Amino acid sequence: MSSRGRRVARARTIAAALTAAMLGSGLPAVACTVCVGDPSSPLTWGTNRGIVFLIGTIGVVYAGVVAFVITFRRRRAARLRGDSATGELALQSALAAKSVQG
């Protein structure tokens, strides 16, 4: 076994021993005060609103990624079809830039 293989085996053995020690210690699991506390307290209300905000932020990011992919698929399909809609837009913007310059 190589030196690297022995190090990996030793790290796995140490990780297994630590996991067994933690699981075998018998300490009770303690929940946070938000989970155990009063459901109508301001701390619980704020935590719940924060969770909803973060989930909403993730949803907006996912929607942006989906819109990005759909846009590029449509552009690619139009280019493969030979559709002039995307090419015409590029031509119009190039002409507008040329007219501004000269």
Image: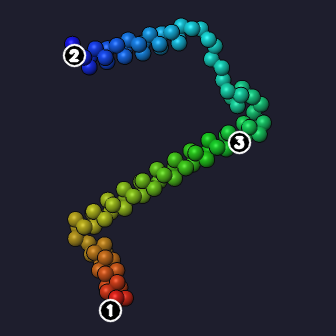
For the residue carrying disc 3, how many other residues have a C-alpha within 10 Å: few (<14), some (14-19), or many (20+)? Answer: few
- Left/right of residue 45 with respect to residue 102 in the rendered view: right
Give the residue type at disc 2.
Ser
Give the answer, above or below, for where 31 lies relative to 62: above
Most foreground residue, 73 or 15: 15
- Where is residue 95? Give x, y as percent: 31, 85
- Left/right of residue 8 with respect to residue 64 in the rendered view: left
Give the residue type at disc 3.
Gly
Residue 92 visible in this rendered orientation of the protein? no
What residue lies at 22% left-to-right and 65% top-to-bottom? 80
What residue lies at 71% left-to-right and 28% top-to-bottom? 33
**Mark closer to the observer (3, 1):** 1
Name the residue carrying label 3.
46
Between discs 2 and 3, the one toward the N terminus: 2
What residue lies at 42% left-to-right and 53% top-to-bottom? 65
Distance from the alpha carbon under mark 2 to that under mark 1: 71 Å
Between discs 2 and 1, the one toward the N terminus: 2
Name the residue carrying label 2.
2
Quarter holding residue 46: top right
- Left/right of residue 17 with respect to residue 41 in the rendered view: left
Most foreground residue, 4 or 24: 4
Q: Which mark is residue 102?
A: 1
Q: Residue furthest bottom?
A: 102
Between discs 3 and 1, the one toward the N terminus: 3
Distance from the alpha carbon under mark 2 to that under mark 3: 54 Å
The reply to whether discs 2 and 3 touch (Cβ–Cβ < 8 Å) is no
- Where is residue 43? Give x, y as percent: 74, 37
In what element is the residue under mark 3? helix
Q: Can you say which quadrant of the picture contains the N terminus?
A: top left
